[in-house]
Amino acid sequence: MSTTDTEMASSTDSSASPDEQARRLYEQYQSADSDEERHEITLEMGKLDGRRHADIYAALEDE
């Protein structure tokens, strides 16, 4: 596992709030050294966004 993978894994830690996770990913994106790193971080951002939307839709179904 590369350093970037380790950082991304810790940045998407489920114990952190979604907003905190998004902030960490954005900071990593800004400091990325290559297009490949930015691409991987963007994929992680998409996964986080998908989980957030799933949580919102689940909450709406419970109302």
Image: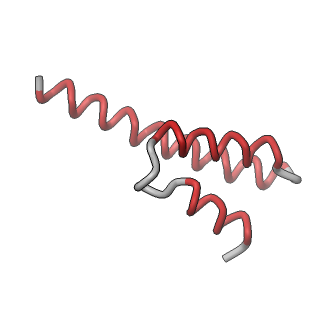
Q: In this image, 25 relative to 61: left or right?
A: right
Q: In this image, 27 relative to 9: left or right?
A: right
Which scheme is used to colour this image of the protein?
A: secondary structure
Q: Residue at x 41, y 55 (%)?
A: 15
Q: Position of residue 62 (x, y in %)?
A: 12, 29
The quarter holding residue 21 reads top right
The N terminus, quarter of image:
bottom right
Farthest bottom residue in view: 1
Q: Position of residue 55 (x, y in %)?
A: 30, 36
Farthest left residue in view: 63
The quarter holding residue 5 reads bottom right
The quarter holding residue 58 reads top left
Q: Residue at x 51, y 36 (%)?
A: 19
In the image, is residue 13 above or below residue 41?
A: below
Q: In this image, 60 relative to 41: left or right?
A: left
The C terminus, quarter of image:
top left
Q: Position of residue 59 (x, y in %)?
A: 21, 30
Q: In this image, 13 relative to 35: left or right?
A: left
Q: Residue at x 52, y 54 (%)?
A: 12
Label tally: 0
In the image, is residue 28 above or below residue 7?
A: above
Q: Residue at x 64, y 68 (%)?
A: 6
Q: Position of residue 44 (x, y in %)?
A: 58, 49
